[in-house]
Amino acid sequence: SKENVGMALNSAGTIQSDYEKSRILLSLMDQKSFDQSQLDFYLKLIASIHSDYEKSRDLLAPMQRYKLTADQTNRVIDAVTTMSSDYEKSRLLLGLAKQGKFDEAQMANYLKVVDSMKSDYERSRSILELLQNNSLSGASMSKAMQDISHAQSDYEKSRVLTTLVHDSKFDEGQMTAYINVMDSMTSDFERSRCLLALMEHNKLSNASLAKVLEAAGSIKGDYEKSRVLQKVAQSYSLEGALRDSYIKAADSINNEYERNRVLAAVVKRATL
């Protein structure tokens, strides 16, 4: 009965062993007589478990059975912040993200946990899962870019940036933050991929376009640099300082074929 489950939960709180406490809590969660009204006490007991593995599996169980309330979601996020394992943190964040939409405070706390991760992979997949069910506010968008800027992997940075830019229109500050993260990459392919995605999904101001041209000029690979510059020429009429920056970047291409293609693109645009 519900009463028996309640008494058993009280008894579980006196157990010292993480493994035994976890095992009993999971078995109680599986009882048909377990009621969601008892979930708050269940979550409170989990907070006393030190083992990341035991804690995470006990927190995942109710997510698979119930739609958590806002307060219960906050309790889970609070529990995640005390964990050390990036993998277990990520498992729980993904479970929460699948539950549905977050309010602004929950999103901020979610991204705060992401920022505490050392693993690039767990960091990026936690952000990408958040985007599946949530449209990020300007503040959360900026925080997500800040979080992924701490990653070492160009691929993981690029994965997140190109998803963020696909889902939202950027303001000037976000475009600058995006380009700054891209500037920290060494891979020509990932850099060009991010610049092409930015241009595909946003109409750039002259200030942002100048930053894109500067970023393109710093790409070492002739082919990747050529791809970005041709996209600029196809999308924008370049005059004055912007045209000078374009020509300067084009002149830095060593491969004659790619350099001629880039220069021809800006001449063709001027005649349209």
Image (tube, grey):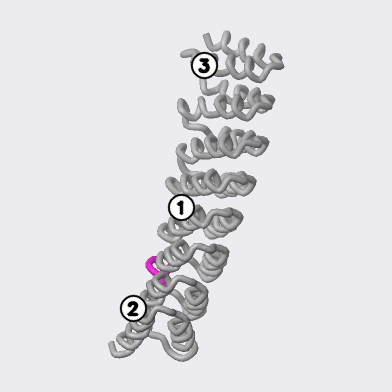
Front position in the image: 84 or 80: 84
Alpha-carbon neighbours of circle 1 within 10 Å: few (<14), some, or many (≥20)?
Answer: some
Q: CA distance from mark 3 to mark 1?
A: 34 Å
Give the magenta range.
198-203
Mark 2 vs 1: CB contact within 8 A: no
Front position in the image: 44 or 216: 216
**Above or below: residue 49 compared with residue 87:** above
Pointer 1 residue: 135
Instruction: Residue type at mark 3: give it.
Output: Phe
Instruction: Residue type at mark 1: give it.
Output: Ser
Q: Residue at x 69, y 14 (%)?
A: 15
The reply to whether residue 224 is in sight is: yes
Pointer 3 residue: 34
**Above or below: residue 165 compared with residue 118:** below
Main secondary structure type of the part rendered in magenta: helix
| Callout 1 secondary element | loop
Instruction: Residue type at mark 2: give it.
Output: Gln
Mark 3 vs 2: CB contact within 8 A: no
In the image, taking residue 180 as reference, residue 194 lies left or right, namely left
Spot occupied by residue 166 in the image (x, y as percentages of width and height)? 41, 59
**Above or below: residue 268 compared with residue 173:** below
| Callout 3 secondary element | loop
| Callout 2 secondary element | helix
**Above or below: residue 168 compared with residue 96:** below
Marked residue nearer the N-terminal end (3 or 2): 3
Quarter of the picture containing the C terminus is bottom left
Single out the residue that lies furthest toward the front: 255
Spot occupied by residue 25 in the image (x, y as percentages of width and height)? 58, 17
